[in-house]
Amino acid sequence: MMKKEFVSEKRLRFGVDQDKAAEGKAINGKPMKTPALSTRGASLATAPATVASVASDYDIFLKFLATAPSKKKEVFKVEVGASGGIDKKDKAPAETKGAKRTSFAVSLPSNENKIKVFDDEDDEEQVEEEMSSNATIPTPISKEDGDEEKEETGRISESLSSETFEDSTDLDIPHPNFSDHYSLYSSSSFVKFRSGNVHIHNQPGSQIILEESVTELEGGGLADDYQVNITVKRSNNSSHVGYYILKAIYSGIAIFIGGFVFIFSVGLLLFLISDLAHQANDAFTSKILFPFFGTLLSVPVFFDGLTQIMALITGFVMDVFAGNPLLQLFGWGSVATNWVTFVAFIGVSVIALIGSLMARSQQVWQITLVTSFISVSTLFIVFATITVYLRVTSCLNLVQEFRRRKMSFSYKVKFVIVTSARSQLSGKKQDLYIYESDAYDLKEVSSMTSTDNSLPNNAQPIRYISRGQLYLRLTQLRILSRIFETLEVPQRRFTQDEINGNLTFFTKNSWSLEGTFCRLRNQSYVSVVGGEAAMTHQQVLSSTICYFLSVIMYVLLVAAILVWVQAPPVMIIVIISLYIVFWVRKMRRGAKISKKLSESVDHYEQLNTGDSNEKAHGLLHKWECYTITRPTMAFTVVYLIFQVLVFFIYPLTFLCASKNIAGALVFIGMAWMSFQKRLLDPAQVLEELGSFASLGKVMVQSESAGLLGSTNMQDWNYKARLYHIQNMSNDASRMIWSRALGSFMLLFVVVAVVAVAAAGGSESSNANDPWLTFPSTNTYFYKEPQSAANPMCRLDTTDPTSSIQYLADYVFLANIPYFKHETLQPLLDTWFGESEAIYNEGAQLEFREIHAEFSKSLASYELVTFPSDSSAAVVVRGTKTPFDYLADAKLWYSSALFQLFRGAIPFGGAFNPLIRFSVSALSLLETAIIKKVAYYPETTKFIEYLKDSGKYNNIVITGHSLGGGVAIISGAQTHTKAVGLSAPNTVLGRDTVTPKITLDDLEKYTFNIIPERDIFPVIGDNLNAENIKCRARVMDTFSLDGCHACGRSLCEILYICGTVARPVPCECVSMFEYPEPVEISGGEAKNFAQVCPIIVPP
């Protein structure tokens, strides 16, 4: 309460209901007592804050004086109408015009509880004497009503307005109570500033300020005649650009770590599914199923644990972006929290930068980034550990309140686990109801239920959506009656919106199309449909259009993806039809809700009177959940034991038996994340309680701030912490990440299943007929270059007699592994000349007989030798079988995802050293089985085998796509010339291979040919590369004969390089639509199509 101070003299006009005053009614909520009164200088003995209830006008003023005792003697000059009326607007009869007004002087001694009253019958000298002794200069006032009265009233109002707030506190004006809900990250601060109360709420980078001001209503004088106004302001905490730079650095590093965790999660799932595919392939031959089922049963635990970790990293990133409010709720204190974050994000990095500069390191930026990454990652681990600990302990504390008796730690853990498992197995029904705000109090959301029969029929809520019916009906089957029991009375389960009591309001000012599109589908909210803040027709219509448009876009997006991957038309029709059937029911529900909104807006618009103070009307969209059936205790225990044995003990035993210690440790971590979320989650207990138990909704108002729902500041911090931790791992966040990770896992599973079904990708079952054909005569060439001479057309300029010296030779060789073995020698004879190039069919088999570790390898490569100069070319096949796709993903998934992530964030190129470090760190996830089935170790060993044989003076390696990427790795490792066509590179992942390669190795020994608009050779970044055009139509970019097709690249090289001693394939004209080559033999001129055979495409 503010300190009360009176000024030495005041002029007041006042008015109180005489009848209420005579009855001793309360003023400002305080009961009045009736003491004795003397009107001729006698004393009025009264206790402070009490007054006499009398019928005369000036006695009303005595009540006002007694409510606010002063520290010093003061004299008030008061005007009272002679007619007995009180001149106050809308409260008492006005004085008769022209009536004489009389002044009364009232003295209030400072040391006595007495009030002296003088009226016009007293001697004026006595009045003057008394007032002089109080250091005032009052004079009797006698004025006629009319203009002079208006002038006096104006002076009175002016006098009060200049002292508005100080006087209002003397009148004991009730100020609004501000209560901080625990949904805030921090409680508000309270200060007194400019004679007013100011409440300050911190926001990220700014403050929301609620400032009180008091003004007098026209003609007022008592507490009821003042109005308290609240002004809402927003102020920036810091407008300096350095502050925002620091926030950008903090957020950028946190986001990068979030991306790292996501890519880690995708990689872990990829390696699991890939490992599973290879084990399944081996199981069909060896009949050993223990490894297969061990890996298979570990997948759900890994997936669920990774989803929880992604929810945690999302909360960490958002907390950093908001200024670490959740970290401050951990109990470290504001100072310690700010120092910890500063050191983790800035301090450690700056120290690393200074140290590397002073050491004159050549990798200053890389050292700084990696150090910062490790520092912030450590902070995230601490954040996640504390969050999980607080969530578990909060759950156990809530159980204590739920049971309302003392419980041991072990008993609480058992109780929570059994209760959570029983809740998960229970049959529940979740319905969306729409309530009229006129029928229910929107503030008491938790007390509103669809089963309330106290309302009239026209006010009953309407159900629009119902969920969980399928599982509920399953639990009600008669065959399951012994393990599921139906409750006599459905048990209410409170939603998070009901527990917290806070709702989202959609008004004409808060509505947005993005908010409508991105709104959580299971969130309760209020649509304001009547009053000044009501939504407009255009907004309701836009929301409806947005909803249906989003469904249409989803359908079209799925169709576009199917078309892009060139799915069969029948498959496209079936999938789109199923998708439409799935959405039809939801669209009907959406149409019903939109119709209700539109009708409500119409209804209240017709009743609109145009009054700005008109009552607002809203529709509450509220989800309600009830438990209908629940499992028996015995079945619940059996269910828990089954889960532990099947999904934890068995996979862990397999991992330990296979000596995969790193995998076992990661599995234990994922199992704990899954276990604590599913069986030690406070949400399960909160849904039963409907509140935070002993931290129930009790409002306490202190001088500093109000704490809604808490008994003290420590209580409030506890609730706020639990609230935000629950929000961080809520169903919405988990749903988003489970869908994202689930999409990747589904893709990997489909590829793995196809790979296993294709009998391990054997050559005989996947080989295609050759589609590269040549004219009957080798006299047709692109005689003249179509552009400036390309110096790279002749790749080997050091030895003009080399058998492989043209760039086209490498591109042609990269094509041949896709063909049947029996067709390879004729193709080589046509291209190089009779017996100039020899296909060595048995070289791979001989090598694998010597090196048994590669006997089960799925890598495919060929050896072509050139007797004229004792040279050899190793040609690695590109992606052809489903196992090849898995090999692609294992080698380059992390580089590809990090490159996408780098392109999505500002200044992403600055993170290149950190990306390389991250890619290297993720390679630790590879299991022993995955390393054995990788392709590049075999090709590297094969080149070393050829070199050790001493048969060849020169060896080169080439390949297309995956084969080109493997060729680049093996070439750099063995210091052999490697040429890749449309090959992903290894600049970012050079530390992930064994043995490691350097940038110098890649620059000196490797070369890549990159067609325009081909996305695959961009993966991994490039050093030595030659870009060529892709003349395919844009719509055919990703088709089988698009920019990635090796045949198109061969035609492009021949076309731009002009005449070389190599024939032009017929497909260059018939399939890829290049100009016809020119016949240069001088013989009979024929059309190029006439000398080309009929092409049978693959």
Image (cartoon, rainbow, N blue to C red):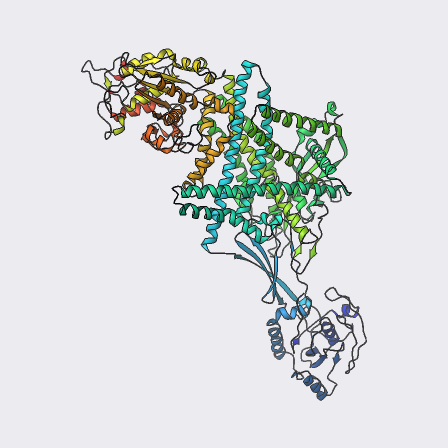
Q: Is residue 826 left or right of residue 590?
A: left
**Measured from the top left, where is residue 438 in percent x and y?**
68, 49
35 to the left or right of 866 = right
In-front residue for pair 432/476: 476
Q: Residue furthest front?
A: 359
Residue 1010: % across, % down = 35, 29
Give coordinates of residue 171: x percent, y percent.
68, 69
Compared to 959, does 512 lie above or below?
Answer: below
Q: Is residue 236 left or right of residue 101?
A: left
Image quadrant where residue 1032 sits: top left
- Examine the rendering and report whether any part of residue 319 can be seen: yes
Residue 347, above or below 757 = below
Q: Residue at x 73, y 31 (%)?
A: 630
Looking at the image, residue 122 lies above or below residue 45: below
Tell me if 522 is positioned left or right of 573 in this view. Answer: right
Q: Decide which of 119, 1011 is in the foreground and name it.
A: 1011
Q: Quadrant of the N terminus?
A: bottom right
Q: Horizontal and vertical percent for residue 355?
A: 43, 47
Q: Can residue 574 be seen in the rendering of this structure?
A: no
**Quadrant placement of the C terminus:** top left
Number of marks in the image?
0
Of all residues shown, which one is farthest toward the top? 822
- Is 843 in front, or is 214? 843
Give the residue at the far left of this rendering.
Answer: 1082
Q: Is residue 580 above or below residue 858?
A: below
